[in-house]
């Protein structure tokens, strides 16, 4: 294991001793908010420290086994122990590296996935529908729950724009790298001469704000409009002005919702989307500043970039940020996104590890 990681892990072991002492003090135990804060930190630090203790134990076992190999009668047993210790040490090192990486507090949050048709007209709208199906199929495979917040359906059955809320375990952490421009190359259903067309959609993934930590919006900065909803929904949806559009006047950011049966529920949902978009704007601005100091292909927040190409004639998906190419496009479009998501997460982890190393040696 790299020396800078060992240094980091030793700090965790020292911090665990400090936390054990602090949590035993009567004044800390009497302050419930402080006690809970330190207890949460203790749980996180203890998990790292215990794995590091195991790493140190297995490192000692490996040294002992290697020393025993010089004794002929012990060699076979020593080789088995050395192989076992080496394998476990590799696994422990990878686990400890992951545990040391900075954690995005939003990773565990639900997310709003916004898909908008771009260049390509009707074909782009159809591709937006395909992307929605891909994400909802992946959500089903993860036992996540999906709910359409708003939609603007195109004439041929796709979407000019659609927003879906996805709730479950680590939703934002898995989907946050999907933000950006998605390009498709294929023969459209509307093409009569078999020519391949290129069109595009944009995807934005927004973490749903934690109500306790969400930014506070001044009601005076909001313009709220109600209108009659359109689209699927039966008789009720077309009879009342239940759809809600909220405009944040200082930024011009707009959110709307028409999926709920009441104006009250639509207003609440639209306000959540609006808050998420404002927070994402702040996040993007911070990421742009960070990018000036540290070039990163992931998490830049720049949705104008083309991040991925879906080439149907070749059955190929290419993620341009990490030069990943997979020839399993049809299964990916059916929701099998695991290989893509894991590759992006691994890339981010490597980037974070590099930053940790630079910081430790600076």
Image (tube, helix red, strand yellow):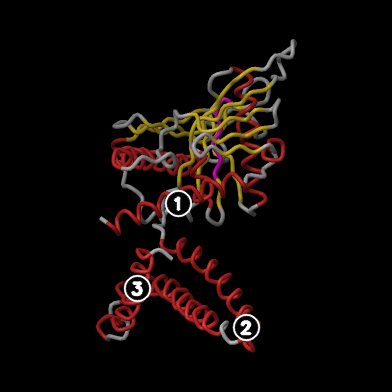
Look at the picture and state if 4 lies above or below 199. below
**Which mark is in front, 2 or 3?**
2
The stretch drawn in magenta includes residue 144: no
Which quarter of the image is occupied by the N terminus? bottom left
Can the viewer see residue 297? yes
Q: Residues within 10 Å of mark 3 (few under 14, many from 20)?
A: some
Residue, disc 3: 10
- The mark total stands at 3
Q: Residue furthest bottom?
A: 73
| Whole-percent x, y for residue 164 in the image | 56, 40
Specify which label sits upstream in the sequence, 3 or 1: 3
Taking depth in this image into account, of 84 and 308 the one nearest to the observer is 84
The label shown at residue 75 is 2
Which secondary structure dominates the residues rendered in magenta?
strand
Residue interval drawn in magenta: 160-165
- Does residue 46 appear to the left or right of 312 in the view shown? left
Residue sitting at x 60%, y 75%: 84
Q: Where's residue 75, x and y in %?
A: 62, 83
In the image, which disc is placed on residue 350? 1
* Quadrant occupied by the C terminus: bottom left
Q: Is residue 238 left or right of residue 107?
A: right
Q: Dots 2 and 1: beta carbons under 8 Å?
A: no
Residue toward you, 178 or 54: 54
Label 1 near label 3: C-beta < 8 Å? no
Image: 321 above or below 80:
above
Q: Quadrant of residue 31?
A: bottom left
Establish if 316 lies above or below 66: above
Name the residue nearer the viewer: 213 or 316. 316
The answer, for residue 242, to whether it is visible in the render is no
Element class at badge 3: helix
């Amino acid at each position: 294991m790299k020396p800078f990681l060992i240094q980091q892990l030793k700090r965790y072991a020292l911090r665990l001793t400090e936390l054990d002492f602090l949590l035993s003090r009567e004044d800390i135990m009497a302050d419930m908010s402080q006690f809970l804060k330190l207890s949460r930190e203790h749980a996180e630090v203890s998990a790292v420290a215990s794995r590091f203790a195991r790493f140190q134990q297995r490192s000692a076992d490996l040294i002992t086994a290697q020393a025993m190999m010089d004794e002929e009668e012990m060699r076979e047993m020593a080789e088995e122990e050395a192989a076992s210790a080496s394998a476990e040490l590799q696994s422990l090192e990878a686990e400890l590296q992951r545990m040391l990486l900075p954690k995005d507090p939003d990773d565990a949050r639900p997310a709003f996935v916004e898909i908008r048709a771009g260049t390509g007209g009707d074909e782009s709208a159809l591709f937006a529908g395909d992307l929605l199906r891909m994400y909802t199929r992946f959500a089903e495979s993860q036992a996540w729950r999906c709910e359409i917040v708003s939609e603007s359906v195109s004439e041929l059955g796709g979407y000019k724009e659609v927003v879906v809320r996805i709730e479950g375990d680590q939703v934002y952490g898995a989907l946050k790298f999907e933000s950006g421009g998605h390009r498709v190359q294929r023969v459209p259903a509307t093409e009569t001469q078999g020519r391949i067309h290129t069109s595009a959609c944009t995807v934005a993934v927004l973490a749903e704000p934690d109500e306790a930590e969400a930014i506070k919006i001044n009601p005076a900065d909001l313009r709220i409009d109600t209108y009659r909803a359109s689209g699927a929904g039966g008789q009720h949806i077309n009879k009342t002005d239940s759809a809600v559009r909220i405009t944040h006047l200082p930024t011009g950011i707009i959110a709307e919702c028409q999926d709920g049966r009441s104006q009250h529920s639509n207003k609440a949902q639209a306000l959540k989307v609006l808050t998420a978009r404002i927070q994402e704007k702040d996040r993007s601005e911070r990421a742009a500043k960070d990018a000036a100091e540290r070039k990163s292909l992931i998490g830049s927040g720049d949705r104008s970039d083309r991040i991925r190409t879906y080439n149907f004639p070749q059955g190929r998906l290419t993620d341009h940020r990490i030069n990943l190419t997979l020839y399993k496009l049809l299964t990916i479009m059916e929701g099998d996104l695991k290989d893509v998501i894991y590759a992006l997460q691994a890339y981010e982890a490597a980037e974070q590890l590099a930053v940790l190393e630079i910081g430790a040696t600076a």
